[in-house]
Amino acid sequence: MDFKQRITAIIVDDILEAAEFLENLLQEFEAIELLPSAYNVDDAIDSIIKNKPQLVFLDVEMPDKTGFDLIRELKELDINPTIIFTTAFDQYAIDAIRYAAFDYLLKPINPHDLRKVVERYKAEMKNADFHKKVENLINRLDKDKLKFNTRTGFTFVNPDDVIYIQADSNYSNLHLVEDKTVTLSMTLKGVREILPLNQFYRINRSTIINKKFLTEINRKEKVCLLKVDEKELSFCIPPKYVKRLDI
């Protein structure tokens, strides 16, 4: 791509003030040509079909349809702009978004962070792997069963059956319902990249839990509790991880 040409972009955010704030920041970039912002997913789809922007600054949390719903619809239409998520929540989704989308910006958006994202976009557009990231995100959102590497091959697991995962050096132990444990030949980082969004939290350096089983977080004791049938499990959770769950 010749970056002497302007990069077309659209902001999708249901909050007018947030969209206008980002518009003002982006107007400082000569390389960016802004389309009119969209304030819901349906209007965004119409604009993206018509104008085919290269960049979409996409809010994650929106009423009726979320940013993830927009991505699903774009995939069905075989339209693949570059997605940069914008979110007010420094929460569980951030780590997953980092691996699956091009990048994210935490609200209120910092001009320095925005410049870094735009410059990285310019630098990485020729990378073939770059164009696979939206598809990877959809796969993580919609996958019925998860495929994990094991010492002898691989295993397929329903995400609802996963209670928690713990790191074990270069391996990870997958703890499932019915007191079943599977050893994966994957680091916890590798496992995290496969787990579906919005369902799993990393609660410390070595443990990821399924929020389906989460019953309580005790800030004072720095523990979180999971309940599986009548069995209760307790895990340490440092304050910085509590903050990520404070949504």
Image (spheres, rainbow, N blue to C red):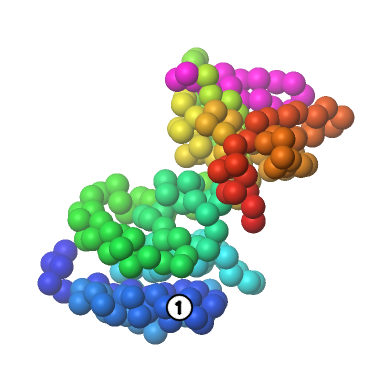
Q: Is residue 220 left or right of residue 141?
A: right
Residue at the image point whose x is 66% and y is 25% from the top: 175
Q: Give the residue displayed 55% in from the left and 59% down from the top.
A: 89
Q: Residues within 10 Å of mark 1 (few under 14, many from 20)?
A: many
Q: Which residue is mark 1?
A: 19
Camera-side residue: 77 or 197?
A: 197
- The answer to whether residue 226 is visible is yes
Pinpoint residue 178: horizontal percent, then vertical percent: 77, 24
Per the picture, the main secondary structure of the magenta-coloured stretch is strand
Provide the residue span drawn in magenta: 169-185
Q: Amino acid at mark 1?
A: Ala
Q: Is residue 174 magenta?
A: yes
Q: Is residue 27 above or below residue 62?
A: below
Magenta highlight on residue 171: yes
Foreground residue among 236 and 138: 236
Horizontal and vertical percent position of residue 51? 34, 79
x, y percentage for residue 171?
49, 20
For this view, does 86 lie left or right of residue 220? left
Point out residue 201 in the picture as x, y percentages from the top left corner.
60, 42
Residue at 41%, 58% (x, y): give it: 104
Quarter assignment of residue 81: bottom left
